[in-house]
């Protein structure tokens, strides 16, 4: 049995976090993400959890990591300018493998940009915003229902893979109101606890699973956490062989699990001569445009990455020989990943950066244009 | 004697990385002796630090230890304490770490009066990066980035945190080591945000440039200029040692717990 409710995307994200068992939130207000903080401020103390409004986004990210180290599932939400401020500590969480979820409800940029307008301009920042080589998981919902379900998944991935997961939302999806079916329950995962005694515990073990067990502070497993390159025991090291091992495991740790991490939706791909690859809010008009094109007899399909990072390159590589069109609300970010697979030939772009959604007719027109070249 | 406190060290991490004559080592010992005297459960103690020479301190100690990013130690510690108030959280920072890049977190931790024991190791310089001036470098003193003498004035750190809402403030030096230990105990016992300014010597990046020939000269300077309140009038270059202020105010995690309890009772 599930309950249906009318909800806003940000609210669904907050509800998803609660369903996943979030117990700590630290944040700093910023449009268009603030509703998430407001819901957390109301709900967390009722559940025995903690909400804290920090002095800035740098401190918010820090507090979230501190709380997660004590075992609390932890969340923060922000938008462009705040996402920039979080980057140093976001990298810290990745390097120290502390699970947490960071929501970025994207708005127009650069800088203060368009605070109340949508954009998809932080796609590359989500992957490479923090310095150094690192793995990254970022999820991109395109409906309110998905805001709910993906936030649960985001926590599950964060806990299972000991990492930061970014919910890369946008102003449209964050503020949209839609009916949501709240499932009675969704599977919820928790971090793997050590099974060995404290004296044998290695918090950053080169485990065959690539994901070491994590003890929480205060539970008798005393260990060191540092953003310096560290060995299996957590202590800093500059030794090349230890550094190489650590970074290899860190950067490859999602590889055995890609099948579960990489999520996407596809429609009408079988005979499609043109595949429109769209994500987040842009996937909504794209779906309509693809349907309209089909009605016109054009062989067009939709590929919607739900997991943006790691980008499902292998999956789209299957469609060699087809044309691709990538509409996005930026000057062309995720399209680069498609070009990495196929080269520039046959990969078309459709971009809009004025704070307005790309319309169905714009996409349809572009589909017709590309298809006329095909024929 | 080290053997008396060895159980609190990760002895495999020794020898430490600090230069000969650095004040960080004796301050570490003062902290560990305070924890031992307090009889705290090693499993419940968390030591958080930022980035700098002084912030390498937790790595040597056998507690739950967290070496964070430059300036952010108090924000990490706030998350730890707010999520699990039963943990005993000590925060070790450098002067640059706490008062320059981390100044915002310092005043807000004070404003919240969150129950953290902060130890600021003030060597008046950016030690780790080789001797640049910090917000605690005295006026006219030399640093690599103030080669003609520092034009700026330093913070009065304890005044700053007191004005921001901290409820305990004290000062000692690497030289006044027993006093430092005692003050750390008092700071721990204060249920609120406590700051100890531990004046330290960095012979390598500060002393050499400022007419201190040896580390011992710097310790002698601490001995001569550190004055216990009421002992004698403060003269140019002197500073107070001992407890500087001690007040009462609501503590953040206790207030939050009260809120949880109130909500349990159905109140809004
Ligand atoms: C964001 C950031 N900026 C700059 C640095 C470089 N850095 C490392 S330590 C340090 C200064 C440390 O001085 P202080 O906090 O006084 O500690 P000390 O080394 O003197 O103990 C700086 C600027 C850094 N690690 N991170
Ligand atoms: S540079 Fe200065 S503060 Fe750093 S270890 Fe050496 S003496 Fe100590
Ligand atoms: Mg210093």
Image (spheres, rainbow, N blue to C red):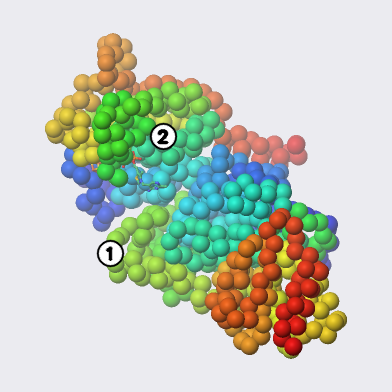
Q: Secondary structure at mark 1?
A: loop
Residue at 50% over, 27% down: B164
In the image, what residue occupies the spot 60% across and 69% down?
Answer: A334
Image quarter for ligand 1 equals: top left
Q: Is residue A295 left or right of residue A344?
A: right
Task: Check the image and report above or below for A189 versus A60.
Answer: below
Specify the label residue B99 is tagged with.
Answer: 2
Compare residues A110 and B159 and report the one nearer the observer: A110
Question: Label 1: which residue?
Answer: A239
Look at 72% across and 79% down and name the residue there: A370
Residue A142 is left or right of residue A85, and the answer is: right
Q: Quadrant of the N terminus of chain B?
A: top left
Give the numbered dot on residue A324: none
Task: Please give left or right for residue A297 compared with residue B257 in the image.
Answer: right
Instruction: Residue A121: name its quadrant.
Output: bottom right
Q: CA distance from mark 2 to mark 1?
A: 33 Å
Let me know if residue A57 appears in the view: yes
Q: Quadrant of the C terminus of chain B?
A: top right
Position of residue B234 measured from the top left corner of the image (x, y, whole percent): 29, 13
Q: Is mark 2 within 8 Å of ligand 1?
A: no
In the rendered image, residue A132, in percent from the top left (x then y), is placed at 43, 61
Kind of element beneath mark 2? helix
Instruction: Check the image and report above or below for B232 versus A339.
Output: above
Instruction: Determine crowd level at label 2: few under 14, some 14-19, many 20+ residues with C-alpha closer than 10 A.
Output: many
Q: Residues within 10 Å of mark 1 (few under 14, many from 20)?
A: few
Q: Is residue B96 above or below residue A100?
A: above
Q: Residue at x 37, y 22 (%)?
A: B243
In terms of depth relative to the viewer, which is nearer, B249 or B225? B225
């Amino acid at each position: 049995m599930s309950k249906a409710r009318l909800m806003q995307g940000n609210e669904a994200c907050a509800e998803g976090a609660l369903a996943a068992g979030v117990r700590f939130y630290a944040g700093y207000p910023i449009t268009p993400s603030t509703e998430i903080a407001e819901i957390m401020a109301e709900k967390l103390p009722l559940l025995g959890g903690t909400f804290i409004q920090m002095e800035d986004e740098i401190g918010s990210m820090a507090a979230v990591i501190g709380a997660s180290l004590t075992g609390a599932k932890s969340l923060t939400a922000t938008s462009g300018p705040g996402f920039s401020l979080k980057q140093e500590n976001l990298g810290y969480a990745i390097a120290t493998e502390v699970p947490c979820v960071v929501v970025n409800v994207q708005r127009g940029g650069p800088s203060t940009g368009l605070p109340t307008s949508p954009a998809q301009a932080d796609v590359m920042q989500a992957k490479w915003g923090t310095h150094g080589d690192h793995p990254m998981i970022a999820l991109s919902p395109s409906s309110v229902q998905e805001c709910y379900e993906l936030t649960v998944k985001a926590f599950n991935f964060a806990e299972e893979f000991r990492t930061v997961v970014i919910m890369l939302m946008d102003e449209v999806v964050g503020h949209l109101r839609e009916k949501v079916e709240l499932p009675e329950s969704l599977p919820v995962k928790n971090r793997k606890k050590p099974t060995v005694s404290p004296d044998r515990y290695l918090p950053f073990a080169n485990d065959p699973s690539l994901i070491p067990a994590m003890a929480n502070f205060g539970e008798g497993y005393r260990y060191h956490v540092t953003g310096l390159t560290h060995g299996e025991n957590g202590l800093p090291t500059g030794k090349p062989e230890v550094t190489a091992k650590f970074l290899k495991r860190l950067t490859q740790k999602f590889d055995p699990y890609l099948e579960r991490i990489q999520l996407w939706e596809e429609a009408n791909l079988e005979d499609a001569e043109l595949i429109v690859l769209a994500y987040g809010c842009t996937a909504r008009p794209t779906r309509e445009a693809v349907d309209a094109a089909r009605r016109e007899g054009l062989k067009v399909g939709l590929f919607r990455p739900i997991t943006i990072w790691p980008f499902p390159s292998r999956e789209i590589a299957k469609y060699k020989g087809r044309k691709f069109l990538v509409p996005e609300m930026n000057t062309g970010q995720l399209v680069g990943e498609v070009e990495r697979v196929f080269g520039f030939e046959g990969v078309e772009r459709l971009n809009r950066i004025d704070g307005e959604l790309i319309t169905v007719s714009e996409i349809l027109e572009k589909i017709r244009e590309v298809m006329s070249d095909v024929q | 004697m080290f053997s008396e406190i060895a159980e609190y060290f990760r002895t495999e991490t020794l020898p430490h990385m600090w230069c000969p004559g650095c004040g960080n080592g004796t301050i570490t010992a003062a902290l560990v002796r305070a924890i031992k005297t307090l009889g705290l459960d090693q499993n419940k103690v968390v030591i958080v630090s930022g980035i700098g020479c002084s912030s390498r301190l937790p790595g040597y100690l056998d507690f739950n230890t967290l070496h964070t990013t430059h300036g952010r130690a108090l924000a990490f510690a706030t998350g730890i304490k707010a999520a699990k108030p039963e943990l005993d959280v000590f925060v070790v920072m450098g002067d640059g770490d706490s008062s320059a890049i981390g100044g915002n977190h310092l005043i807000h931790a004070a404003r919240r009066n969150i129950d953290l024991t902060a130890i600021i190791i003030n060597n008046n310089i950016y030690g780790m990066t080789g001797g640049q001036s910090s917000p605690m470098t005295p006026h006219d003193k030399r640093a690599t980035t103030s080669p003609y003498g520092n034009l700026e004035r330093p913070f009065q750190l304890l005044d700053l945190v007191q004005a921001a809402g901290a409820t305990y403030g004290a000062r000692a030096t690497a030289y006044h080591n027993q006093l430092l230990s005692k003050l750390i105990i008092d700071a721990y016992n204060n249920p609120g945000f406590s700051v100890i300014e531990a004046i330290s010597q960095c012979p390598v990046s500060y002393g050499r440039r400022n007419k201190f020939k040896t580390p011992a000269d710097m310790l002698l300077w601490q001995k001569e200029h550190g004055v216990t309140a009421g002992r004698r009038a403060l003269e140019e270059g002197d500073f107070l040692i001992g407890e500087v202020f001690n007040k009462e105010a609501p503590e953040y995690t206790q207030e939050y717990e009260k809120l949880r309890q109130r909500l349990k009772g159905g109140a809004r």
